[in-house]
Image (spheres, grey):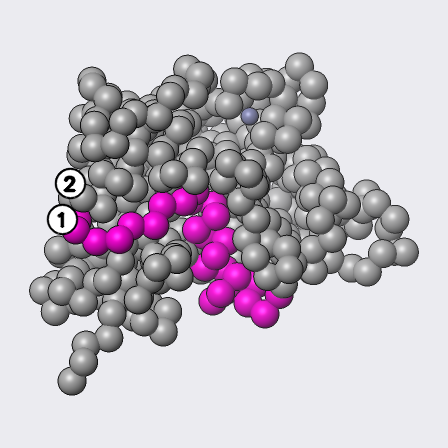
Amino acid sequence: MVETPHFIGFDIGGSNIRAEVLDSHGCPLQLRTSLRRALPGASETAQGQAFEGIPEAGGPHRLPPPEGRLPEAVMGIVEEMTASAGEEISSRIAAVGVGCAGLIGRDGVVLASPNIPGFKGVPLRALLAERLGRRVALDNDATAAAVAEASLGAAAGASDAVFLTLGTGIGAAVMTDGAIRRGSHNLAGEAGHMIFERGGRPCGCGGRGCWEQSASGTALGRLARGRAEAGGWESLRALGGGQTKGIRAEHVTMLARSGDRVACDLLGEFAENVAVGVNNLVAMLDPEVVVMGGGLFAEAEAGGFLLSRLKVALEGMLSYGRRRPAVALRRAELGDRAGAIGAALLARDQPGAD
Ligand SMILES: [Zn+2]
């Protein structure tokens, strides 16, 4: 019997690495081992730290010291996880896909990664291909997640879609005419860095007032902590364990669902911030569906509640209002597995694949 090829996909985020194995039909395998590892030094990574400019790409197969230790550690984990899928599966893996947070050039070089400071000018695709002895596809993590949602999730069957992930920042990708758009340098889809407020909060990209500074999960948490610090709002403080710093974005949704007036107002304000960017993307791209993902949308009831607030906010501002066909807003369906599944699909579908 000829063994069918399998494909493994990795999602390298700011704090951990997770993996999914797909068979040749694109079906995720149920593995007994949990394929998730913490990224070493994740707690030391400076979230939102400004990029120190985009460096020139390093030469092939050469790690730029001293930051080379982090790519080395990441590669070690990827190698170990590929083996940990088990001999029977590992021997079938024909290609490896990697979705990585940050700017990924067409040549497979990580130009910069806001939450993984060691990833600057790292030729990750070439390094991994040499280390693993397999073909490697490398792309931005939001692009990988969009590929998964477009193939197996909330945008399956659609040809024009926008994918947004509200988390630490805002991950985004665009599909038109059935193809994910990458731009001239593979840097398309950085919707989180569209300017929302000129001269506003500094952003990890080096700019100011970017959309993700007002409409990401991080932004909602910050808005809530600010409101709590201003005084009162004991119900929110209690959810944060009695301390302002324990307050998270999800707590606002939780309180708003229970009818808390301050939480409802704050969530409405946040939904308007999100809707401004969504409106602009809809005006520009005319998608049939906008897929909303990330922690705030992960849980069905809380995510559905926030989505309903977003729909109301969007209806109130959508360019041309009811004169244009409605845009479907949907929750992402693959949750935090999307990035790794999409990376495996990229590995399967890359040019030159078997
Ligand atoms: Zn920015």
Query: Would residue 80 appear left or right of 125 to someone viewing this image?
Result: left
Drawn side of residue 213 relative to residue 80, left or right: right
- Secondary structure found at label 1: helix
- According to the image, label 2 marks what residue? 76
The amino acid pointed to by label 2 is: Gly
Rendered location of residue 212, percent (x, y): 57, 31
Contact (Cβ within 8 Å) of mark 1 with mark 2: yes
Q: Position of residue 230 (x, y in %)?
A: 60, 18
Is the C-beta of the residue carrying label 1 under 8 Å from the nearest atom of ligand 1?
no
As drawn, is 260 to the left or to the right of 138?
right
Q: Residue at x 61, y 44 (%)?
A: 256
| Residue 82 sits above or below residue 16 on the image | below
Residue 43 shows in this picture: no
Residue drawn at (39%, 19%), measured in percent from left and top? 55
Question: Residue at position x 17%, y 49% from top?
Answer: 132
**Toward the viewer: 26 or 247?**
26
Q: Which mark is residue 300?
A: none
Q: Is residue 290 magenta?
A: no
| Residue farthest to the bottom, as pictured | 1
What range is drawn magenta here? 132-158
Mark 1 neighbour density, 10 Å: few (under 14) some (14–19) many (20 or more): few
Q: Residue at x 38, y 21 (%)?
A: 56
Q: Report which residue position mark 1 lands on.
A: 80
Q: Is 153 a magenta residue?
A: yes
Residue 12 position by quadrant: top left
Of 31 and 140, nearer the camera is 140
Q: Quadrant of the C terminus?
A: bottom left
Residue furthest right as drawn: 323
User: In this figure, what is the number of numbered marks?
Assistant: 2
Report the image quarter containing ligand 1: top right
Instruction: Find the distance from the CA under tag 1 to the CA under tag 2.
Output: 6 Å
Quarter that holds the N terminus: bottom left
